Amino acid sequence: MTKNQEILQLAEKYGFDECEVISAEPFLQYKKDFEKSSYAEDSDITYDPKAYKKDADKIVVLLKAYNPYDESYFTSDHIYVDAYYVAGNECYFSAKNMAEEISGWRYAAYASPRISFRHCAYRAGMGKRGMSALLINEKYGSYVHIQCLLTNAPLDITKNIENTEICDDCESCTLSCKGGAMQGNGFVDINKCVRHYMPAKRYVPEHIRKMVGSSFIGCTDCRVACPHNLKIAKVKPPQDLLDACYIPVLADSEHENYKKSFNTLRNYIGTNEIKKMKLIKSVVIVIGNTKDKKYLKILDKLKSRNDDKDLLEYIHWAENEILKAAI
């Protein structure tokens, strides 16, 4: 059995739907793109994989398809968690486990390197770039998550193209964006994108708070609007995840079920996104958007327990949104 066949078996073992091997040469198109706009990429992502790890010359590109959640299962008393972030957390650990197995073959293997996963997928021929800056896969639409491994394992390159095609079938994603973040050319102004702010990892301006709706993390509008996604069936979220999204519990750290809900969210989304202050700030913003006066007592209790400046501002804003709706 060749090493490529072993890699394919590993990818299948860990639940990935597509697997290609590409070269680790610099991503010059990403460099050009980044100079124009950081479109939702972090500034520490490098265009040159060898600058990240000099001993790696191949990239294993992994793609996992997922089914979006049926939003109807999330009531007005729930924060909404998109299936993309659950799939992303699963893929992170699957790629990490794959890298450990490859290391057991006595080769270097690095999971989740700081390189542009989307540009890796373009080079691997896994799809084209949407106006939304998301990868559009022919079979799965944009309901996919990408992971990458940098390695020096003796693998044959299976795909190595420079696909710069931008999906221009329609402008559905661009028109659906409440914040006007999409520039219509495959770039996104991150300062106008809900995902840049939520969960509340930085100060959330008032106009962004109103766009959040019930979403705890990110925004789903561009994916929902994309015609390439219409064929993908929605599914019921796991019951324990739904239970963990119940606002009255998440808003009260002294509730008997709070710890269980907190840990469940961590298991599904990851420890980077589920931190106590991030969580409560995001929950308060969602409460403001419910405009439900039954939450006024909870907000009042939160005020007495916290002195974080931003959180207190969000509580005041949420109270005002609820009171205005009651008039």
Image (cartoon, rainbow, N blue to C red):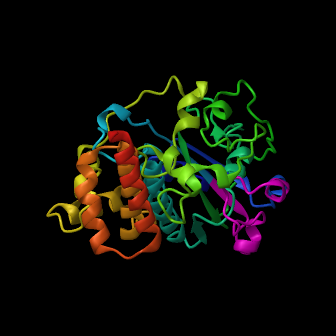
Decide if residue 308 is on the left or right side of residue 229: left
Q: Quadrant of residue 140?
A: top right
* Residue 267 horizontal side relative to residue 39, left or right: left
Q: Is residue 48 shown in magenta?
A: yes
Q: Position of residue 272 (x, y in %)?
A: 45, 67
Residue at figure coordinates x 76%, y 37% from the top left: 184
Q: Which residues are magenta?
A: 31-60
Q: Is residue 5 visible?
A: no
Quick one: 99 or 284, which is closer to the camera?
Answer: 284
Percent of width and height locating residue 287? 35, 50
User: Can the viewer see residue 60?
Assistant: yes
Q: Residue 76, how many percent across, how many down?
A: 30, 40
Quarter of the picture holding the C terminus? top left
Q: Is residue 258 above or below residue 306?
A: above
Q: Is residue 285 above or below residue 105?
A: above
- Residue drawn at point x = 79 percent, y = 44 percent: 161
Q: Residue at x 40, y 52 (%)?
A: 320
Instruction: Using the image as rendered, state which of residue 327 and residue 93 is in the foreground.
Output: 327
Please provide percent x and percent y for residue 166.
Answer: 77, 36
Most foreground residue, 156 or 23: 23
Which residue lies most toward the front here? 327
Residue visible at 62% across and 52% down?
61
> In which image quadrant can residue 268 be found?
bottom left
> Where 204 falls versus 81 (above or below)?
below
Total labels drawn: 0
* Magenta span contains residue 218: no
Decide which of 320, 215 is in the foreground and name it: 320
